[in-house]
Image (tube, coloured by chain):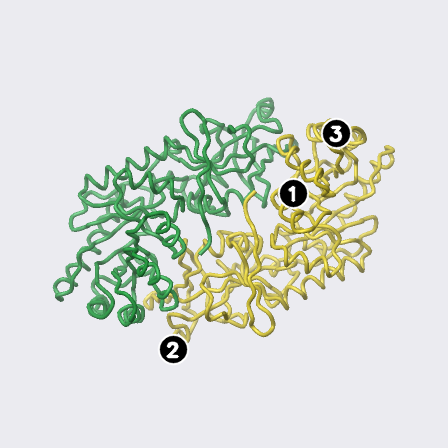
Chain colours: A green, B yellow
Amino acid sequence: LSLFEISTPAALIDEARLARNIQRMQHRVTTLGARLRPHVKTSKCVEVVRHQSLAGARGITVSTLKEAEEFFDAGFSDIFYAVAIVPDKLDRALVLAERGCALTLLVDSAVAAGAVASSERCSVDVMIEVDSDGHRSGVSPESDELIAIGRLLDRGAARLKGVMTHAGSSYELSDAPALRALAEQERSSCVRAASRLREAQLACSEVSVGSTPTALSAGNLEGVTEVRAGVYAFFDLVMVNVGVCEPSDIALSVLTTVIGHQRDRDLIIVDAGWMAMSRDRGTQRQSRDFGYGLVCDLAGAPIEGLAFTSANQEHGLIDCSDLPEAEVDRFPIGTRLRILPNHACATGAQFPSYQAVDAKGGLRPWSRFNGW
Amino acid sequence: LSLFEISTPAALIDEARLARNIQRMQHRVTTLGARLRPHVKTSKCVEVVRHQSLAGARGITVSTLKEAEEFFDAGFSDIFYAVAIVPDKLDRALVLAERGCALTLLVDSAVAAGAVASSERCSVDVMIEVDSDGHRSGVSPESDELIAIGRLLDRGAARLKGVMTHAGSSYELSDAPALRALAEQERSSCVRAASRLREAQLACSEVSVGSTPTALSAGNLEGVTEVRAGVYAFFDLVMVNVGVCEPSDIALSVLTTVIGHQRDRDLIIVDAGWMAMSRDRGTQRQSRDFGYGLVCDLAGAPIEGLAFTSANQEHGLIDCSDLPEAEVDRFPIGTRLRILPNHACATGAQFPSYQAVDAKGGLRPWSRFNGW
């Protein structure tokens, strides 16, 4: 089957772009002297993550225990579950560790640290989450709490492995100097937390930082042992606005078919609605609002004059008022288009599988999973 | 397993609320003299739709061929695929018809009508989509195109069954008189289209209208034979703002667990991020912006002072700055909460299955499906 024959909407992965993106990040992190532990929450796809491993990645990062279980079953055994563990989820996590998974857990509270340390099942490596930018979770690198949690993890079934941080506010930036400064803040906060633990005679071998924008902007990674990043494998329009990639780097797209026209209102209607694109409007507050995505031709090149302005569940509404009237005839019912997504993690999650597109236009199904 | 034991995040269906919502819509449509053909795109769940059928619904409406196939395999045989068919999808649709499904297709163009009529496989019923409110797709009830399409469908393998419209702009309203007026516009446009086809000696037995807000607001349905509506089974916060339900009617919620706190920033962090809630921010431009959802206790009652303001993929950030400081202690790590969704169709789609909660708190898994 070809791009003209498969059922739409479909999620396509451009294999050449994927390979280029993976090489770029791997080369950069290696050059800066750290290991790369890709976040698999973006693709949730074994084939994509095998590409990352073959390129040199060491271990994976997951956002759910489902991801940990699926990837462990697929042969990945070095897994960092990078969302704070709660007592409720500990049993399920320890089952994986007992099965032989080198699973690392994350805590940012004494409650969770105490629960892990007092488990009477197997022992497990634990990282402490550090807040480097006030974005979400983690303890301050200067806090007493950091040391208190470290001491809780220096006994019982827990082994304190290190510290981690995620400068998620990098997604809100769009100029290189600010990104570079935030990357340095992310690095120095995490290194500072590691130093304080070591000064308190606590082990802290791992210093893990990362987000796609900071990883691509860091001037140096002194003291950092590993970098985590996810969306770089696919990239997306949010990352275009942040300034770390071009539309021509985006490896994920949604294949769609024109199903109608509303000539009076300059609309082309396609069968990719928000169920296919996701409701992620991440570019809404950025420098360029791409609506529900950037409309491209089958080769993946953007089409001037088309704007994906609105979406219902299974209808996408593409405004063609910037096209000369006669040009609309280039897009009759049945025309196939590719839409680049605002946010690859969200759009990918709308699909049960991808179609990988090779350089010759050949398609191969790559499965993904969803749920928890 | 109970609500305290199942893995989170999880999608819960309150069976009592579901039953009440289904009864309410069925009673209303029956009283107005029409049949109800529920749209299953909201739940994509056989158990929910069986409830609707048992309450008196006649046939179902679907938004994808996957829905048609899944529900046909589950025993539903009267299915209206209410998105304009394109030639590419015709073969797949006709397979269902050949298998014995009473499948009705939709067209709003001469291209699609011609393709259906010239098929040499089995014959199939076809509806014409009418645009009643400039919301999306369909032909004008006063247009020559309507009659031209009707003539195309009066021959070959196609059987012209009737006209349909969907006043989707009802979602943008919030007062009863405007909703009632739009419901009348939806009704009269569709009845007018039917009259014009009949005047042209074309068969038009079915006049199908609907959206949840207009169905609940119509003063009369004279000339209408069937009503389609979907979200009423679950309701959601968008519908609360539209004014057709209360939060206590919402049957779908997301069960989540508190995984951390950021005391300095008055944040409670839960394990329902946007992957669980969806990125649908449908209440953002309405009278009350509910953020990523309305935070409730385990019994489903809203908790004053908590606002679900932000979300990452697997982290929900609940602002508790309106709570007295001591009150935050009511929500320690491990606390379980229920979040009512902005848009039930979008939130449901993030889950591979639901947990139905009966009056005694007992849980039963109800599967759903996604994809195309």
In the picture as drawn, the residue positioned furthest to the bottom comes out as B326
Q: Earlier in the sequence, mark 2 or mark 1?
A: 1
| Above or below for B141 versus A75 | above
Q: Earlier in the sequence, mark 2 or mark 3?
A: 3
Instruction: Report which residue position mark 2 lands on.
Output: B326
Q: CA distance from mark 1 to mark 3?
A: 27 Å
In the picture as drawn, the residue positioned furthest to the top comes out as A326
Q: Is residue A164 left or right of residue B349?
A: left
Q: Residue at x 45, y 42 (%)?
A: A367
Q: Is residue A178 visible?
A: no
Q: Secondary structure at mark 2?
A: helix
| Residue B135: numbered disc | 1
Q: Nearer the viewer, mark 1 or mark 3?
A: 3
Q: Secondary structure at mark 3?
A: helix
Q: CA distance from mark 2 to mark 3?
A: 70 Å
Name which residue type carries label 2: Ala
Q: Position of residue B282 (x, y in %)?
A: 54, 53
